Image (tube, rainbow, N blue to C red):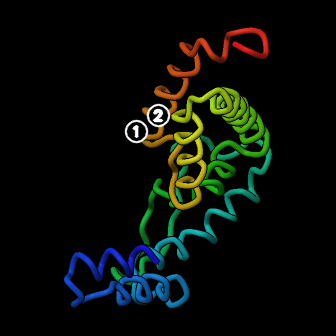
Amino acid sequence: FFTIIFSGVFSVGRDFGLNTLIGRGGSQILNKLDVSAGTRKAILPGLIEAIQKKPFFGQGLGFEVNFFDSSKKETIKTRHLEWGYLENLAEFGIFGVVIFYLLLIFILYKSILVYNKGETRPLMAMTYLFITNIFMQSFFHAYGMFIFAFTIAILSNNKKIHAHGPNT
């Protein structure tokens, strides 16, 4: 909806962004329109196979998958798996994911506590990371690490979270 409005306004009515909206959406089904969608689809079987091979402890950080790139007509090896949560499962395994997500849930819990007392930044930052990790590996990207550091710094220095009593 916003794409249509902003495209229409900024193009002075010449383009309402429907080509981008429909084209990108269609590429998720017909991966011939968008190389990125095709690559994600090609990586998925190798990623699922890796999860099945080592489900409990995972493959480790930096794990690579081979896939056939139909646009280049060759097999490519990559560490950029582009499936955030599945990538976590393939690299850490079930045990690693449970431990890692318990840490994330703890940070999210603390973010909600300070949000209820008027500090919105930590919850917004954590929500952003959880959403973007659907489409890419946000947690271990440089900006994800920065957001973690930013959030933890705010939470550890926030007097609202350390104050005792209902009215403080």
Q: Residues within 10 Å of mark 1 (few under 14, many from 20)?
A: few
**Residue under the point 56% across and 29% down:** 119
Residue 28 higher or lower than 159, as above or below: below
Q: Residue at label 1?
A: 142
In this picture, residue 66 sits left or right of residue 143: right
In this picture, residue 12 sits left or right of residue 4: left
Give the Cα separation between the discs numbered 1 and 2.
Answer: 5 Å
**Residue under the point 26% across and 88% down:** 15
Q: Position of residue 146 (x, y in %)?
A: 43, 32
Give the structural element (helix, strand or loop) at label 1. Answer: helix
Q: Position of residue 143 (x, y in %)?
A: 41, 40
Residue type at mark 2 is Met
Q: Position of residue 155 (x, y in %)?
A: 58, 21
Instruction: State which quarter of the image contains the C terminus.
Output: top right
Q: Residues within 10 Å of mark 2 (few under 14, many from 20)?
A: some
Image disc number at residue 145:
2
